[in-house]
Image (cartoon, rainbow, N blue to C red):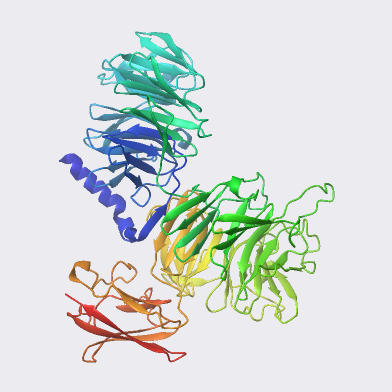
Amino acid sequence: MLRYFLAIFFIFISWYNFSQNYSDLWKGYFSYYQVSEVIKGDDLVYAAAENAVFRYNTVTEEIQTITTIEGLSGMDITTIHYSENYDLLMVGYENGLIEIVFESDEDVLSVVDIVEKLSVSPTLKSINHFYEYEGLVYISTDYGISVYDLERLEFGDSYFIGFGGSYAPVNETTVYNDVIYAACGEGNAIKYAPVTNPNLIDYNQWTTIGSGSYTNIQSNANGLYVLNNTSLYRISGNSLSSIYSMPQTPLDFKLVENNASITTQNYSLVFDLNFNQISIVDSFNPYNTQFTSSVVLGDDIFVGTLGYGVLKYGISNNKEVLEIRPDGPLRNDAFKIQTNPNEIWITYGDYTISYNPSPIRSYGISHFKDDTWTNIPFEELLGAYNLNEVAISPFVANEVFISSFHGGILKLNDEEATTFYTPNNSGLESLVVPSDPNVVSVRVSDLEFDQQGLLWSITSRIDNALKSFDTQTGQWRSYSFEDIISDPLNGELGFSDLVIDRSQTKWIGGYLSGVIGVRTESGGYQIKRVNSESSNLPSTVVKALAIDNSGQLWIGTTFGLRVLYNTNGFFEDPNVEFREIVFEDDGIAKELLEGQYITDIKVDGSNSKWIGTTDSGLFYVSPDGQKTIYHFTTTNSPLPSNFITDISLDSANGTVVIATDRGMVSFLSGGSNPSSTLEEAFVYPNPVRPEYDILGKEDLNDINNGIKIKGLTENVNVKITDIEGNLVAECQSRVNTRTSSANYNFAIDGGTAIWNGRNLANNIVATGVYLIMISDLDSFETKVLKLLVVR
C-alpha cells in the first residue's frame, strides 16, 4: 500500500505541469533500428533503443512502445531492468537519471537522486546495470554502487568501493550465496562483501579478487562467473579459473533460467548451464550489422543490433530470422523535415554551422504516409550525400526534390530515386578551388517551389548562387551574386533558408551576408544584402526565415529574433532596419527571444509563429509576437530534447511536426490554413453525443474538446443559432482567436473554428438542432451547416 501511495504521489508531482500541456495531443516518431540492450520479462522481450523502449509479446507477437509520449525523458538509455516481483521496468540513463515504468498503468516515476548528487561529478553518474535482490536494486554506476528500495521507492546507501574508498566504476553486480560481487573497471578488479553486512558503506568491508578490469559478472545455481577481455572465468573462493575464450570482446553477458548468452560485436553465443556451447549466430548473414546484446527466452534467442532493431533466431535452427521493431524512421537525429497533408519526409544530411559538409553523410531518407514508414537506404539514392531540404512538387503527384549539400539535387517519383541533378546533367555548378581544380562539391542548401511551379535553389560558394529549374521543360536559369559577394568561394560560406513571398521576391539567409533579397520578376533583376549592425541585425548568421500572412519577414539568427515589417520597400530603402519584438512582462519591457540561437520559424494558418531554438525548446507566439502561447521544453512536454533542428506544419489538420537531435514528435495544435472557398466547409463531430464529453470546456486550446468547423476561408464571420433563429454564439476571423486573453467560447484559428458548446449566457446548450451560418467577409460567399447536439 505504501508503494502504491508513494508512486501516485511522485507521479502527480512529476507530471502536474505536463498534464497542463495537453499530453494527449502529442505523438512520437522515434527510431528503433539501434538497440543497446534486450532483456526478458513475463513472455515479453524488452529492448532499449537510443531513447525509447519497446516490448515484444512472444505469445501474441504484439509490439508496444514506451517513449517520451508515455513519460520517458528522451535522454540516452544505458541499461534497463524488468522486475517480475513488482511488475515494473527500470530505465537507466547516461546522466544518472532513473525512470520507473509501472506496467499495471504505465505511469512513469522519475528518480533524480543520482542526477542531483552534488558530491559526484556529472561524468561519473552513468547507470551501467541494475541487479535486483530481495526487494532492493543494486545500481552500478561509474562512481560505485547505489541501493534503491523497490518497496518504498526510495534510495538507500551508496558504496564507494575503490582503493582507499575512492570512486570506482562498477559495471555489474550480482549476489551469490548471500555475498554481493561487483565487476569493476579501471583496474579495480572484483570486489565482494556479505550482502547482509550493515556497514557496506565502509570500503574496508569489501575484499578484492584478482587484478585488472572486469566487464560483466553473473551468477546462477551452478556458480559465479565473470568476464575479463575475451575470457570467461568461474569464481571459486578467491580464485579465478578460465572456462571459455571468446572470439571477440564481449559486450553483454546474461544467465537466464537454463541458458547463458554472451554477445560480441559479430556473434551471439548460447550455452547450457555447464557452459557447453549449444548455438551461435553471427551478424554477417543474412544481415550485415553489429550485435549489442542478447537474451534467451524459450527456444529462441533475441539479439539487439545497431541496424535492424531486434533479430529473433531459433536456438536449434538459426537460419530463419525475424526482424522485430516498431515502425519508425531510420534515425532519431532528423536534420530537415517537410510535411504534406498526412505525410512527412525526413532527411539526415547535416552540415556544420559554418556550412562544412565534412564528414560526408551517406544516410538514407524516411517517408511517413498513411501511418506507414518507408525508409529508403543510401544505396538506393544514386550516390546523393548530405541530403537536406525537401521540396514537394505542387503539380506532379508523388514527385519530390531533395537538395544535396555535396552533390546537387535528387528527384524521387513514388519513393524511387529517378534523377540526380549534378553539373554533368543540369545547370548546377560546383565550387571551384584554384589550388585543386579536381574538387567537385555542389552545395545546394535549400529548395522552394514558386506559384508558377518553378523550382528555385540556392547553392553555396559559387557566383550564380540562385537558380531556377522548370521541372516540366528542363530549363535552368542562373542569377549572379557578384554585386554583393565579390569572392564567391570565401565571401560567403553558406546560405540557410530560401523563402518566396507573394510578390515572388526571394529571401535568403546567409552565414556572413545576413539577409539577402532578390527580385527576378517583370524582366528585371535586383539584389540587395543587409548585414550591418546599423540595421539592428543581432548577428550576420541567419538560420531561419519565414514570410507571415501579412507579408512580414521573420528572421531567426544565432543571437536573436528580428522582423522586417516593410518588405515591399526593402530594395528602395537606403536604411533598412530590422525590428526586435518588445513585450511587457510585469511592467518590464523585454525582447522576445533575446540572445537565443534560433533554428527555425514556421507560420501557421492563424498567422501565429512556431519558433525553434538550440537549447530552450519550442515557442509558439501570437501573430504579433506579443504573447507566448506555448513554450514547450523537455520538462513540460514530450519533447525528447530542447535542441529543435526543424519544424514543419501539416496544414490539413493543424499538426506541427518537431524534429530534435534526439527524435521527432508532433503536436496537434488545431489550427489549419484557410481554404480558398467555403465549398468544403464541414462541422464535426456531428451529431455531438453525450459520451463524447466535449462540451463546456473553457480552454479552446485543447482541441480534443469542443466542436470544430473546418474548411473556413481567410476572413469569415460565423454565427450559430438555434432552430428558432436565436443567436447562440458568434465569432469572426482575426477578432475572436483561441489564444486571446478574453477566453472566448467560440474562436477561429486560420481555417478552423472551435466552439465549446456554450451560449452567450455562458451555459452549455441544450439538446437540439443548431444552424451554423458562415459568411466570407471579402467574397460574400455563404454556407449553412446543420449540427445536432444530444445531451
* Residue 497 in view (yes/no): no
**Residue 164: percent from the left, percent from the top?**
43, 18
**Residue 202: percent from the left, percent from the top?**
34, 20
**Residue 785: percent from the left, percent from the top?**
31, 83
* 161 left or right, relative to 489: left
Residue with the most extreme left position: 1
Q: Relative to 97, say whether 388 is above or below.
A: below
Q: Quadrant of residue 771?
A: bottom left
Decide which of 158, 675 is in the foreground and name it: 675
| Residue at the image point whose x is 71% and y is 81% from the top | 572
| Residue at the image point whose x is 61% and y is 50% from the top | 381
* 614 left or right, relative to 154: right
Decide which of 615, 446 is in the foreground and name it: 446
Quadrant containing the C terminus in the rendered view: bottom left
* Residue 22 in view (yes/no): yes
**Residue 626: percent from the left, percent from the top?**
46, 73
* 197 left or right, relative to 778: left
| Numbered disc total | 0
Q: Quadrant of residue 551?
A: bottom right
Quadrant containing the N terminus in the rendered view: top left
Q: Relative to 669, say whether 46 is above or below.
A: above
Q: Relative to 315, say whether 52 is above or below.
A: below
